[in-house]
Image (cartoon, rainbow, N blue to C red):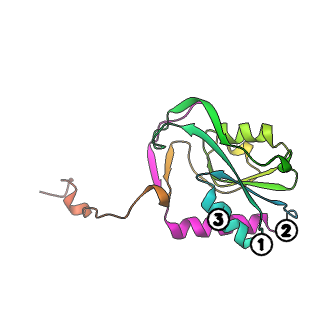
């Protein structure tokens, strides 16, 4: 799957992320007696913490995969994915484990993790159409050409009023 250059930008607030992570927990509730959660770092850490709290799961593992450019905002991808921290050997093939990430974009990370953890359940808050089939459970679909700005990626700052942005057909 090749990346699509972002045409749309979707900023997500902390409140919205929390609400959507809780919605993900509702979808996962009573599906299985989970052994634990595997958070895909870094983006999956916050959603995994919220889901762990809501489902009363105390064991949270992490797996760290690097797949984007150095600044994480450039949709151009590195040639190879790199696992810089793997899950504990006790996880095995993932039976009874819940893998949580913030989003499935190109699907490369999830596809690689599915090979390593074929029996795990994969869940994200956001899913893009090309990679949606790789996810077992998600909350919100966003278009392939949308770049999501998560709350840990942005700061609140002043913005000019619309009237001061430029001249339109009704402005002098």
Indicate which disc residue 95 carries. none
Q: Quadrant of the N terminus?
A: top right
In the rendered structure, which disc, 2 or 1, sits on the residue that comes first in sequence? 2
Front residue of 50 and 104:
50
- In the drawing, does residue 68 fall left or right of residue 99? left
> Which mark is on residue 21?
3
Q: Is residue 13 visible?
A: yes
Front in this rendered view, residue 34 or 92:
92
Q: Are marks 2 and 1 in contact (CB under 8 Å)?
A: no
Relative to 104, residue 171 above or below: below
Residue 30 is marked as 2
Alpha carbon separation for disc pair 3 and 2: 16 Å
- Give the x, y percent position of residue 44: 63, 55
Kindly report which numbered mark, 2 or 1, lies closer to the viewer in this rendering: 1
* Residue situated in front as seen by the camera: 145 or 100: 100
Q: Is residue 61 magenta?
A: no
Q: Does residue 29 sit above or below 64 in this rendering?
A: below
Location of mark 1 (residue): 56
**Horizontal and vertical percent for residue 9?**
44, 50
Picture residue at 48% right of the left edge, 59% below the top: 152
- Categorize mark 3 by other alpha carbons within 10 Å: few (<14), some (14-19), many (20+): many
* Place of residue 123 in the rendered image (x, y in percent of width and height, measured from the top left): 72, 54
Q: Is residue 107 left or right of residue 121?
A: left
């Amino acid at each position: 799957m090749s990346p699509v250059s972002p045409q749309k930008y979707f900023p997500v607030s902390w409140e919205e992320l929390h609400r959507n992570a809780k919605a993900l927990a509702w979808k996962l509730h009573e599906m299985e007696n989970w052994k634990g959660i595997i958070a895909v770092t870094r983006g999956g850490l916050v959603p995994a913490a919220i889901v762990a709290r809501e489902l009363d799961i105390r064991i949270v593992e992490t797996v760290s995969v690097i797949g984007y450019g150095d600044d994480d905002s450039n949709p151009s991808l590195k040639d190879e994915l790199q696992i810089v921290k793997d899950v504990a050997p006790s996880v095995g093939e993932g039976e009874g484990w819940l893998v949580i990430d913030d989003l499935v974009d190109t699907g490369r990370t999830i596809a690689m993790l599915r090979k390593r953890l074929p029996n795990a359940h994969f869940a994200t808050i956001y899913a893009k159409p090309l990679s949606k089939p790789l996810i077992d459970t998600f909350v919100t679909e966003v278009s392939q050409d949308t770049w999501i700005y998560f709350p840990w990626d942005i700061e609140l700052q002043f913005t000019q009023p619309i009237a001061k942005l430029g001249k339109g057909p009704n402005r002098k």
